[in-house]
Image (tube, grey):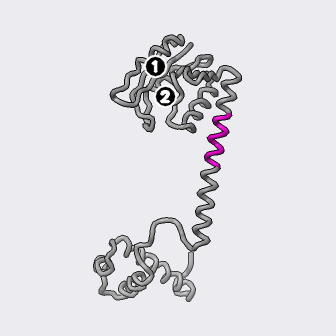
Amino acid sequence: MLIGYARVSTDDQTAALQFDALTQAGCERTFSEHASRASAERPILAEALSHTRAGDTLVVWRLDRLGRSLPHLIQIVQRLEAEGVGLRSLTEGIDTTTAGGRLVFHLFGALAEFERELIRERTLAGLAAARAQGRIGGRPRKLSAEKLKAAQQLLQDPKSTVSGVARTLGVHRSTVHRVLQKLDAKKIDAEVERGLVQAG
């Protein structure tokens, strides 16, 4: 059984062209969806996929009507393949029920994997270069070394309050709380070392 899937992405588009092409291709049932390419929500596509059975073929007018991206498209094809369902794209002339069509998608899958590996390698190389230059990733510290020392000194005073220290340093109370937790942890560690507090 041939099952069609059509998608339009803007209000001024209609699925008439896709419907005509899918009908001429022999689709017995066609599902139509209004969603942008970037949209992760594709309830009609999910419905169309749930109607496919082993031996069926999902037919689209063009591949970009089906997947949000190449990895997403490969993911759909792999799901269809696992369920014994073919995919046919009318514009590109790809049919995964044929040896040639399967080869094209295996090449697409290899390219998608290659792209992911390149991105990963570039990211790791960038992080290594940043570390070599003394830069560390993550959010910048709210407290400079001077302010951190000032916060520690202010918090030693029993009369100091977290809110007061935060106002003095121009930071949020939660930042001061984190400094206080570090101070408490250091104090406990020091007492453990001196044998004042039993570890464990």
Residue depicted at x 46% and y 77%: 182
Q: Which mark is residue 65?
A: 2
Could one spot residue 101 in this view of the protein?
yes
Amino acid type at mark 1: Gln
Q: Residues within 10 Å of mark 1 (few under 14, many from 20)?
A: many
**In terms of secondary structure, what is the magenta stretch mainly?**
helix
- Labelled pair 2, 1 in contact (Cβ < 8 Å): yes
**In this rendering, is residue 200 above or below 109?**
below
Q: Earlier in the sequence, mark 2 or mark 1?
A: 1
Q: Residue 23: horizontal and vertical position, in percent?
A: 48, 12
Q: Residues within 10 Å of mark 2 (few under 14, many from 20)?
A: many
Q: Which residues are magenta?
A: 107-117
Q: Is residue 104 left or right of residue 138?
A: right
| Residue 115 within the magenta-colored segment of the rendering | yes
Could one spot residue 58 in this view of the protein?
no
Q: Residue 42: horizontal and vertical position, in percent?
A: 44, 31
Residue depicted at x 39% and y 28%: 34
Q: Residue 43: horizontal and vertical position, in percent?
A: 43, 29
| Residue 1 within the magenta-colored segment of the rendering | no
**In this rendering, is residue 142 above or below 37?**
below
- Real-space Cα separation, disc 2 to disc 1, in angstroms: 10 Å
User: Which residue is labeled 1 in the image?
Assistant: 18
Q: Which mark is residue 172?
A: none
Picture quadrant of residue 71: top right
The C terminus: image quadrant: bottom right
